[in-house]
Image: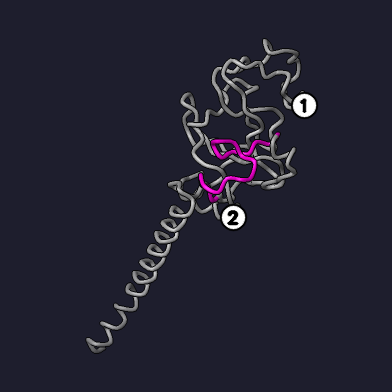
Amino acid sequence: MSRSFERRVGDADWWPFVRDAGKTLLSGVLLLCVLFAITGVWPPLVAVESGSMAPNVRTGDMLVVGDRFASPGADEAGVLTARRAAALGATQFGAHGDVIVFSTPNRTGPPVVHRAVFHVAAGENWYARADPAALPAGVENCADLPNCPAPNAGYVTRGDAAPTYDQATGAIPPAARQWVRARALVRIPYLGWIRLLLAGG
């Protein structure tokens, strides 16, 4: 076998792979940079890790998130709550209200991706404003309700598939505006599974 033939076989073994991997990596980086420039949030993509937003947003979906392009009628933080959206007849991902991405100081792990239902003031008794169907059984007044009066100003949130408000369980306080990282803008079905599988999720 000639040396030139051996060189061609060896080149064919690794060079196309390196070239294609480099192009794919560069394309991914450029896409993320463009999304960051458009959305104003880094990272601009969030993989959905649970089914709490089903059927409108499913486990394994990828969400493009941002803090620009607020919906008409949104508050000063750019969030359109479900209550306000219902009055305006506006929907997003199959229901009223923005889907927000937030973390709280008392919680570790991935951020929460749930719908903002309504905003409460610090110290507010929000029991009367709550939908009784979204409260745990046996709750009859503010004293029975965790996070009531509200320990801080923020959004009462709920996953579309969840039976109750997040704040009605006591684990999550109202989502303060400074804890809201972004709003979900676009859903890409199934793409999030790549990230979840790579992360062992």
Q: Which residue lies furthest to the bottom in this view?
A: 2
| Amino acid type, callout 1 | Ala
In the displayed structure, does residue 196 sit left or right of residue 87?
A: left
What span is in magenta?
64-83
Q: Residue at x 62, y 45 (%)?
A: 71
Q: Residue at x 77, y 23 (%)?
A: 132
| Amino acid type, callout 2 | Ile
The tag earlier along the polypeptide, 1 or 2, is: 1
Name the spot of residue 24 as percent of width and height, x first.
Answer: 41, 65
Q: In which quarter of the image is residue 117?
A: top right
In the displayed structure, does residue 6 sit left or right of residue 39?
A: left
Question: Which SS class for mark 1?
Answer: helix
Instruction: Classify 34 as above or below 181.
Output: below
Task: Specify the label residue 38 is tagged with.
Answer: none
Asked whether 76 falls inside the magenta stretch, the response is yes
Q: In which quarter of the image is residue 97?
A: top right
Asked whether 77 falls inside the magenta stretch, the response is yes
In terms of depth relative to the viewer, which is nearer, 90 or 103?
90
Q: Callout 2: 10 Å neighbours few (<14), some, many (20+)?
A: some
Q: Which residue is drawn at 48% across and 33% down?
A: 109
Task: Specify the label residue 188 is tagged with.
Answer: 2
Q: Callout 1: 10 Å neighbours few (<14), some, many (20+)?
A: few
Q: Residue at x 57, y 25 (%)?
A: 174
Instruction: Classify 71 as above or below 14.
Output: above
Residue topped by disc 1:
133
In terms of depth relative to the viewer, which is nearer, 55 or 165?
165
Q: How far apart are marks 1 and 2 (CA)?
A: 30 Å
Name the spot of residue 124 as percent of width and height, x first.
Answer: 62, 17
